[in-house]
Amino acid sequence: MKERTILFVDDDCVVLRSIARGLLDEPYNVFFAKSGEEALQILSQQEIHVLVTDIRMPVMDGTELLKIVTKEYPHIVKMVLSGYTNTTDLTKAIHQDGVFKFIPKPWNLQEGEEFRETIRSAIEHYNLRNEHAEKVLN
Amino acid sequence: MRISQRLNLGFLAIAMWAAVVGHVSLYQLSQISAPLNIDIPGSLESMNETAHLEGFAQAIRYYDEVATQAVRNYAFTQDKKWERRYRDAKSEFDSMITEVIDKGIERNRGLLSNVNDTNLTLAEMENTSIGFVNNGMAEDSIKILESNSYWDLKKIQERNLEDYAHRREVERYEALANYSRTVSLAMERTRNIAKYSRRLVSIFTIIALVLALGSGFIIARSIYIPLQKLKAAAAETGKGNLDTQIEINSTDEIGRVAASFKKMTDDLKKTTTSIDNLTREILDRKKAEQKAKLACEELEKANIELKEMQSERVQNAKLASIGQLAAGIAHELNTPIGFVSSNFETLESYVSKMHQLLQLHSELISNIEDSEKSDLLEKTCAIDKSRNSMQMDFILEDIAGLFNDSREGLKRITNIVRVLRDFSRIDQLGNLDTYNINDGIKATLLVARNEVKYDIDVKTKLSEVPPIICNAGQINQVFLNLIINAAQAIKSQKRVQKGSIEIRTYSTHDDLVCEISDNGPGIESDDLPHIFDPFFTTKPAGQGTGLGLSISYDIIVSKHKGVLLVESSVGKGTKFTMKLPLCRKKTRNESEESCHERENNIVCG
């Protein structure tokens, strides 16, 4: 199977670096963006299969980015990684923006490997959803 | 028909009857006056005339005799007076004859013309005789007078005059008889008319009486009976029987009075009904009043409960604020904890990889003496391979970054905790302490960072201010309230551009002043007087407790004897100014009061 690519968006570089470290041994490509704008730039250049974004960011926040992605790249599986676990935002993200999963901060790498598990399941979800379409395309 | 009309009609009937009676009476009177006017005067006149004529006849005979005697006397005496007497008598005689002939009745004229003829002859003879006397021939004169022819003529004359007089007399009697007959006839007739009239008048009087009585009775009846009914109805109504029916259907005054009366009773009935209703209503109201009293008591009870609840609510609001703050702080903490723990786990895997590699190296080193060179080379290659697969180069390079990042995360966490501690001053046992409010503002901004981070530029113009004695925790709570309110107001506008909050501190001679202004939506002028009221909020239900500003006001004004002012214009923004007195003495009372408030000093929001 073709390698999948994941894009992480967070305004905090430290967060992005820790994610990069954590996913060192994972079998997929990773991209990182420090803002919504940067994320859109990467999206226009690379083929991305899974998007993981923070919600509260300056200028363009996660909700807005998710909206654009839903419209422009409907095949991408979207996920949220946020410490701001406001129920309203959470429900809104899942229902309106078609978010696959919500990963709360602080995320856990070791215990049951939750974080990586979640990302893997997102890739699987993507594969299942796009298998048929890709077959047709190929 | 109206009573006045009825009365008029009655009077008209009587008047008409009177007119008829009058006319009949007049006719009767004219009947009576007819003989008086025509018959009696006529017969009276003819009687007078005949009497007159008879007088004439007598006078003619007299004057004839006087003339005859005078002429004889003259002839015998020759006294001139007799001639004069003769002339007078003769002229009277002649004039009377003429008058009689003129006035006399036709059949007498012939008689009198005979008289006149004889008279002329006699007069001639007598004149001749007188002439003889005058000429002194008295004897001749006497001869003439004594002559037969004279006497014959005289006799004829006398007889004629006698006849005439007789006839006159007869006529006079006839006229008298006629007159008396006429009079008696008229009397008879008058008597008859009078009799008839008397009867007529009595009949008329009776009829008039009957008519007057009848119409009077009818009219009176038509007035009296309904009046009687009305009276009875009024009496009934007076007794309170309002259902009394009056059967008067006439359209006259009484009918109208009856209608008015009926209307009155109806109105009265309505009024009575409404009075009944009123009485009922009064009863209802009394009941309601009692209920209201009960309700009032309940309300008072509820009020007491509410007051209890209010303090509970204030406490809850404080807890809610703590919750809100805690959520913000949690988020602030979540991120560094997230990546620090992530790094920690990564480090574990790094260490385990290194451990493996070290193990491989140790094995290599321990076998280095016994092994072949080629063997060693092979093992070294294997180690290199696993080292590569472990991405050990990256790990070694990254490990410094990992530590740096983790240190950064721990620093952030430490900072947050410190700020929180600074903010709440939870470690300070004394409630009143010397505090620089600039530090308080900085701490509060850090706490509020999560609220303002992405939407608002916060500018601070903090001048050097002297420290003041205050309850720092409470003052910070006020700062946080004002800053978060401003931030939420700005965010409620959902604007594209960032909002701004400006915080300024400075000191005047007496006060330490802090101004917190925003360029948010402002406060409606209707709401402005209420913003410090407890439970007043313009936020959607469930999102605001309505206690933040009231607590702030309490802290600044009641607890610190300061001033909290607000200026706002819709669309431009809001500015809160708080002034704290610089020379505040720590009195015993306040200290106690503050001790009492100690449990609140962590509160904000």
Image: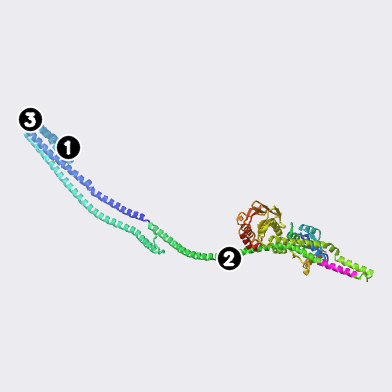
Badge 2 element: helix
Q: CA distance from mark 3 to mark 2?
A: 180 Å
Left-right relation of B377 to B162: right
The secondary structure that dominates the magenta segment is helix
Mark 2 or mark 1: name the one nearer the start of the chain. 1
Label 1 neighbour load within 10 Å: few <14, some 14-19, many 20+: few
Label located before the other in sequence (3 or 1): 1
Secondary structure of the residue carrying numbered label 3: helix
To which quarter of the image does residue B593 belong? Answer: bottom right
Magenta span contains residue B363 = yes
Three-letter code for the amino acid on which mark 1 is drawn:
Glu
Identify residue type, mark 3. Answer: Val
Read off the chain for label 2.
B
Judge if badges 3 and 1 mark residues of a common chain: yes
The residue lying furthest to the bottom in this view is B370
Name the spot of residue B170 as percent of width and height, x first.
Answer: 14, 44
Residue B593 part of the magenta-drawn span = no
**Residue A45 shows in this picture:** yes
Q: In the image, which residues are magenta?
A: B348-365
The residue tagged 1 is: B99
Q: Is residue B400 left or right of residue B23?
A: right
Q: Which residue is mark 2?
A: B305
Q: Secondary structure at mark 1?
A: helix
Residue closer to the observer: B321 or B211: B321
Q: Earlier in the sequence, mark 3 or mark 2?
A: 3
In front here: B76 or A89?
Answer: A89
- Compute the Cα span from label 3 to label 1: 31 Å
Residue B282 drawn above or below residue B98: below
Image quadrant where residue B220 sits: bottom left
Q: Is residue B423 left or right of residue A6?
A: left
Instruction: Count residues near mark 2 (Cα–Cα under 10 Å), then give few for <14, some for 14-19, many for 20+.
Output: few
Which of the numbered marks, if any, corresponds to residue B133? 3
